[in-house]
Image: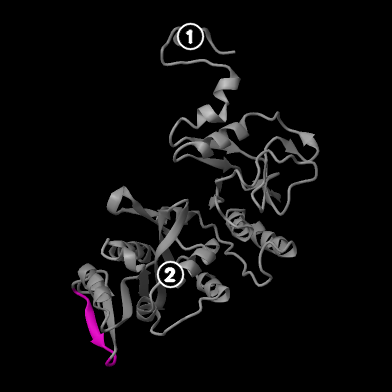
Amino acid sequence: MGSRKLYEYVHKNPMFFFRSSEFVNDPNFIAKNDHFISISSALEVDLTGQVCSDSKDLLFYSGMGTQVDFIRGASMSKGGFSIMVLPSTAQNGKVSRIVPFLSEGAGVATTRGDVDIIVTEYGIAEMGRRSISQRVIELARIAHPKFRTWLIEEAKKRRYVFPDQLPLITEDLIFLESYRGSLPIADGKNVEFRPLLPCDEFESRNFYYSLQETSIYYRFFSKRKVFSRQMLQQQWAYLDYHKNMSLIGLVQRGKRKRIVAIGSYAEAAKNTAEVAFLVKEDMHGMGIASFLLKSLEDIARKNQYKKFIATVLAENQKMLRVFTKRYPHARIEQVNREWVEIHMPFEPGEP
């Protein structure tokens, strides 16, 4: 096994260190490497996150291996995590590798509690600290588009999701990964930005409920007290990530990522989209709104829009400053005593 050249290179080379499998595969030793990332493959994953990697139905495909050792070592590592990768389909696209439940006889090589991230060619699903319903939505989203509706319907039968759960978009959404971004803020932290996804329903509700009444009124022009699950479902039901787009900003707080900002645009007329966003009060003054506005403009340009418009309460001077800073050529029209409409062509001189 290996060429003579390889053995001569390794012989007495201080860059190589050989130990027994009892040492190399010990999760406690693996965990001593900060930011350790474990990458493993899978044959099949069920909608709750259970992973089969060593058998296919009743047939053993491989031995037990060291997958669990490295996954748990990564989870104990400071800043570490595990990634599970697999193609979305098998048998030339005839069957989905993401399934409602594992095949009869399939072994659970990695439990649902051990998996952090699952990746297919259709995207990235974050499993860590997710409920069963959130896991279902995340995994169905990265399944092959032709199997997504089937997976949601199967999940409904097992009561993993609510009976009125809306179907997922069947378009290939891998392009959404290019819309991720990051903004450095105080204390060496970052705000991570990415498109709003169906699995964000719970965190979105938490975000809205955490806001002050004034912020809610400035955004919705009414004193809303309730942000129901149905309302949040409708919010992403209209998302097509072209004519209707939403980005969220997240920060790490403890062991969870919390939404601290939401920005959206929706088509208002030909070449024109209406824009709006909301930032948590304790995150004001950090450039988050400006970052969101620029990011939304970049996406809008890709979708052939040439202009943003926004309706703003005249007293909301902070929002007006964000808009006029980005678009000093913006035109502001008084709608009534309370509201103004601001027209923001992306290029000066455009109508």
| Left or right position of 111 against 325 | right
> Quadrant of the image for the N terminus?
top right
| Element assignment for label 2 | helix
User: Which residue matches tag 1?
Assistant: 5
Q: Position of residue 116 (x, y in %)?
A: 55, 46
Residue visible at 47% across and 30% down in the picture: 32
State which tag comes first along the sequence, 2 or 1: 1
- Answer whether residue 336 is magenta in the image: yes
Using the rendered image of the protein, determine whether residue 127 is visible from the camera's viewpoint. yes
* Residue 81 x, y percent position in the rendering: 50, 41
> Secondary structure beneath disc 1?
helix
Q: Which colour scheme appears in the figure?
A: one colour
Residue 22 rendering spot, x and y as whole percentages: 60, 21
Type of amino acid under label 1: Lys
347 horizontally vs 181: left or right = left
- The range drawn in magenta is 329-337
Q: Which mark is residue 210?
A: 2
| Kind of residue at badge 2 | Ser
Residue 101, above or below 53 = below
Please identify the quarter of the rendering in which residue 285 is found: bottom left
- Figure quadrant of residue 327: bottom left
Residue 12: x, y in percent? 44, 7
